[in-house]
Amino acid sequence: MIMKDTYKTAFKNLIILEIGDYVSAPYCTKLFADYGANVIKIEPKEGDSSRKSAPFPNDIPNSETSGLYLNLNTNKKSITLNLDTSDGKALFIELIKKSDLLVIDKPSSYLNKIGLPLELLNKLNSSLIITHITPFGNNGPYEDYETNDFISFALTNRMSPHGIADGPPLQYGSDVILYQIGTTAAAASMAAIFARNKNTKGHLIEISGMEAQIGNVDTRTVFDQYTKRLLQRGSVDLRYPTGCYPCLDGYIVFGSGEDRFFRRLCSAIGKEDLLNDPNWSIPANRESKQEEFETYLLEWLLVRPKQKVFEICQEYGVMCTPINQIGDLFLDPQLVHRSYFVKSQHELAGEITYTGAPFRFSKLEWNISSTAPKLSQHTKEILNKFLGVPVKDLCILKSNGTI
Amino acid sequence: MNINNYPLKNIRILELTEVWAGPMGNSLMGDLGAEIIKIESYPRAPITRPHDVISARRGLVENELSQERPWDGYASHNMANRNKKGLSIDLKTEMGKKTLFELVKCSDVVIEGYSAGTMENLGISYKTLKQYRPDLIMVSMPGWGVDGPYQKYVTLGSGLDAFTGHWLLRTPPDTEPTETMSIYHTDAIAALNLVVSVCMALFHRDTKGTGQSIDLSQAETFIPHLTKYLMEYSMNSKNPTQIGNRHPSRAPQGVYKSKGDNQWIAISIRNDVDWGNLCTLFESNDLLNNSLYKNALERIKYHDEIDEILNNWTVQYDKFELMHLLQKHFIPSAAIMNEREIVYNEHLTSRDYFIKIDHPIAGEHSYPKNIWEFRDIQEPLFKRANIYGEHNEEILNSILGINQEDIAKMWNKKIIGNTL
């Protein structure tokens, strides 16, 4: 039951409301739920759209067994609430009054239309923190643009320099951007939760998905301004060897051939004698000799499996990594050693392997103490026990389409 | 400026990190109002502070001043280090270490980004530092975490992209992974997770009164972002197929040519409604009204054909003109912009998203502002990246109260420095 001291964490008294769909907002609140906060997921009656998204066990669609939904909604409680009805709005306002953080991804135009603008919610509970996630922010010419993960990525400067040389701009793995936006929301929200401990006033935070991407470090927005040279698809501007090379059973990636790493690599592949020659030992001199060096390198790589190449290179301090398939991660020695993945039994989906803690505290517990909720699983519990709505009224709310 | 509204006001953080993930995460906490003291390696050059022009030629601003001080004119450093004070100090010396201990006494958080063991070897591990500040919060953020077989391994974000499987996801069909370029997305993700974890630990300290250590594996912060692929493997033992710009369950989706050289527009049809809207723009074209393309499954089957029709149409339009037209018809679409165009983008300009900042060595450039907007904070903090050694005196004198004479000794003995 909610509010009960079940978690040994600092978060056990936090109440977080999520009105969010698919990945961004749900991933944001998952970060809190998995460390012990109480997250109430408010779903429309058809449920979060991630419930309809693959994968499903044995490819059989079922709104309670989507792998995406199950991993993104661990440790949460689900209620359904129709915000278009006046009873639904009234219940929502009661929840707002008792909550610490609201994470919401609905456009301002919709919230105004149903009579629940964020400013009003802020007035109803001045200590409430509101984190509002939208694709393009709450004003400007693109505010109401239609989008999804693909378009939100394309409508930045990130897709333009990404791709194969001479090929078209290319997306990252699909959805990946949405997690970045959700994590951005979590960072701002958590800072506000900490601050509220001191001055009791909640913040209203706007997250623009576009700016969350453009303002972060990997987007390299200022490089061209510094060098008058646009980033080019297929090239990364670092010394060789950089990027992907084949080996016996797959591929590996080198971080960069900056001097100290180049020297270490020569040792790792038994070519330290090269460094006695100024044509190799002086970085500027070796620039024109990439092809020759790669002949030596490939000779060494092509007779060794990727994991072996990885281990040998790293013993010498070379930034080298294998290219893994997704499935390789479950057997990776490091992730296995750290027990990163976590198995948990789900009533309908069976035993599933979940992703583990994104970071580990010495004094704050991360765990999956309950699997993702079924649609509306906790409506009665939250309304009756948390808000004090009498059981007889619940029947009325159900029949008039509020819950 | 009124600092009262900033959530991390009065928090002091010591940063010992290099390259992007740690520096960016600390900049973000600087945005939130924390005082960030960046301890920079001296006399060994930090990785993003090249000591000579030759090793800096990629990313070095083109002007005279940066020929003198290349380490201060480097894009890689300057974009990831706003809102900080810098102390460049040799931590291998006893005096350097002692100075660090004094700083730890009056700091809330220490963040280090070296591979496991480096801090221990320097004699500045959590166990040691905790003695100077019992409620210290300390984050270690190596590539793969603080224990296990890879604890000492080194990497850039590109390596973690490969390790986690994302490299292969980014490799289009019928293409060798050797063609795929390095990206550094995990740096952005680790930076964000650093902020979440530090704020959680600060909250914990305020409610329970204790500090703690945080083990942040940069690989593990990114792995959950691949949920649907991992769950597909977990549930059905299937690895993802390479799909380029396409999507497994909606079509068409892709990047299409628009008018001009190397100009592109992205279009994604989410469902039959979007498709219907697109077809109304194609009144004269029988092919798009072809009944064979009525549902997503069919459209996935005929994706190549549809792409050809679309390309012949999109190439006639300017990318912005076409985006405006498509969006007017509620069709998800994006004019693909490079980093030169984005600075002048109509939407971002209307939101004042870029801010012009002057830097004594690099000159004036437009930088993106905060990745979030707090309504109560009118003016986001944006103090340009620190010059190497810029705040040595200020930190040693104003914070630690070391007198000028002793500071001069530290300069002379090369315990602190401001050139490389």
Image (cartoon, coloured by chain):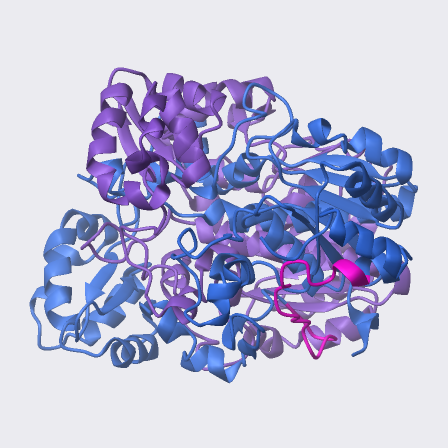
Chain colours: A purple, B blue
Q: Is residue A159 above or below residue B297?
A: below
Q: Is residue A353 above or below residue B402?
A: above
Q: Relative to the observer, which residue lies in front, A384 or A19?
A: A19
Could you say where residue A166 lies in the image, as x and y percent from the top left? Answer: 18, 55
On-image quarter of the C terminus of chain A: bottom right
Looking at the rendering, which quadrant does residue B60 occupy? bottom left
Q: Is residue A358 left or right of residue B233?
A: right
Q: Is residue B74 above or below residue A310?
A: below
Q: Is residue A11 visible?
A: no
Q: Is residue B108 left or right of residue B388?
A: right
Q: Give yes or no for residue B67 being in the magenta stretch.
A: no
Q: Give yes or no for residue B382 being in the magenta stretch.
A: yes
Q: How many marks?
A: 0
Looking at the rendering, which quadrant does residue B237 occupy? top left
Q: Relative to the observer, which residue lies in front, A336 or B416?
A: B416
Q: Relative to the observer, which residue lies in front, A296 or A301?
A: A296
Q: Is residue A47 above or below residue A267?
A: below
Identify the residue at the far front of this view: B412
Could you say where residue B168 lies in the image, as x and y percent from the top left? Answer: 32, 37
Residue at image point 16% right, 52% down: B303
Q: Is residue A96 left or right of residue B419?
A: right
Could you say where residue A288 lies in the image, as x and y percent from the top left? Answer: 23, 44
Q: Magenta span covers which residues?
A: B373-394
Residue at image point 60% right, 42% down: A73
Q: Which secondary structure dominates the residues rendered in magenta? A: loop
Q: Relative to the observer, which residue lies in front, A125 or A200?
A: A200
On-image quarter of the N terminus of chain A: top right
Could you say where residue B142 lies in the image, as x and y percent from the top left? Answer: 60, 35
Q: Is residue A324 visible?
A: yes
Identify the residue at the far bottom of this view: B350
